[in-house]
Image (cartoon, rainbow, N blue to C red):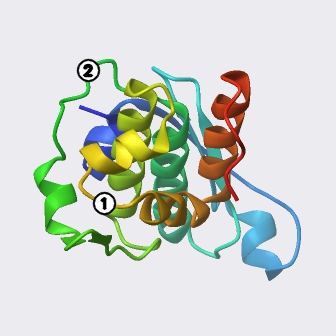
């Protein structure tokens, strides 16, 4: 199972969680209370930070969301099944993929699309066909998280494939 799919507590059990202070705007609470959160995913080494909110709980939620997105981009599942997941199928309307980038389903869908793309040697048309959508729907999914599109273009450049816009 891809780590971006894990429930919050299961994901946090794989992380080193550090609570700290950060300076900057936000008043006395921000400067004197450890409201900033740093998460390091031990298996992958990916780390994220959230310190823009005034409470530790809100920063933890933001950090978990950021971590899921970074895991979706940075970790590839070694075994990819040849058909879309049930979650993917619930998000398809015909060949149109419907998911808000702020929804909890976005990181798992992003990870799944990139896993299929990597399994098909970064060929977008083949990945779109396997995922029962269009290439433009996949590119739109990746554009919602620019590091994802950057990663796709990086891998495509190594293989001599054209850059996606």
Residue at 35% of width from left, 36% of height from top? 116
Q: Position of residue 56 (x, y in %)?
A: 55, 64
Question: What residue appears at the point 37 percent right and 72 percent down from the top-left corner?
Answer: 103
Of the 4 image quadrants, the one containing the C terminus is bottom right
Image-based side of 71 in relation to 156, left or right: left
Q: Which residue, as the protein is rendered here, is positioned at the far left? A: 86
Place of residue 141 in the rendered image (x, y in percent of width and height, measured from the top left): 48, 63
Most foreground residue, 95 or 45: 95
- 86 left or right of 106 in image: left
Mark 2 — residue? 79
Q: Quadrant of the N terminus?
A: top left
Q: Which residue has dot 1 on it?
A: 133
How far is mark 2 from mark 1, CA to CA?
Answer: 21 Å
Query: Is residue 163 visible to the viewer in this orientation of the structure?
Result: yes
Could you tell me residue 78's position as x and y percent?
Answer: 33, 18
* Image position of 13 (left or right of 24): left
Q: Residue at x 37, y 40 (%)?
A: 126
**Residue located at (51% from left, 47% from top):** 67
Judged from the image, the secondary structure of the residue bearing numbered disc 2 is loop
| Relative to 157, residue 19 above or below | below
Q: Is residue 160 above or below residue 135?
A: above
Q: Are marks 2 and 1 in contact (CB under 8 Å)?
A: no
Q: Is residue 79 above or below residue 96?
A: above
Res. 94 mark:
none
Using the image as rendered, state which of residue 40 and residue 138 is in the foreground.
Answer: 138
The answer to whether residue 159 is left or right of residue 67 is right
- Is residue 12 something one can see in this rendering? no
Q: Position of residue 43 (x, y in %)?
A: 45, 20
């Amino acid at each position: 199972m891809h780590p971006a799919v894990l429930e919050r507590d299961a994901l946090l059990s794989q992380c080193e969680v550090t609570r700290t202070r950060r300076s900057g705007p936000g008043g006395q609470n921000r400067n004197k209370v450890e409201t900033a959160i740093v998460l390091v995913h031990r298996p992958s080494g990916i780390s994220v930070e959230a310190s823009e909110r005034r409470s530790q709980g809100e920063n933890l939620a933001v950090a978990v969301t950021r971590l899921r997105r970074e895991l979706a981009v940075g970790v590839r599942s070694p075994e990819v099944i040849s058909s879309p997941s049930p979650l993917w199928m619930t998000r398809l309307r015909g060949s149109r993929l419907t998911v808000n980038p702020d929804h909890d389903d976005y990181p798992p869908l992003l990870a799944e699309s990139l896993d299929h793309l990597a399994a098909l040697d970064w060929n977008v048309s083949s990945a779109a066909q396997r995922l029962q959508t269009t290439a433009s729907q996949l590119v739109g999914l990746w554009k919602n998280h620019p590091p994802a599109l950057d990663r796709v273009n990086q891998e495509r450049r190594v293989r001599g494939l054209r850059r996606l816009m």
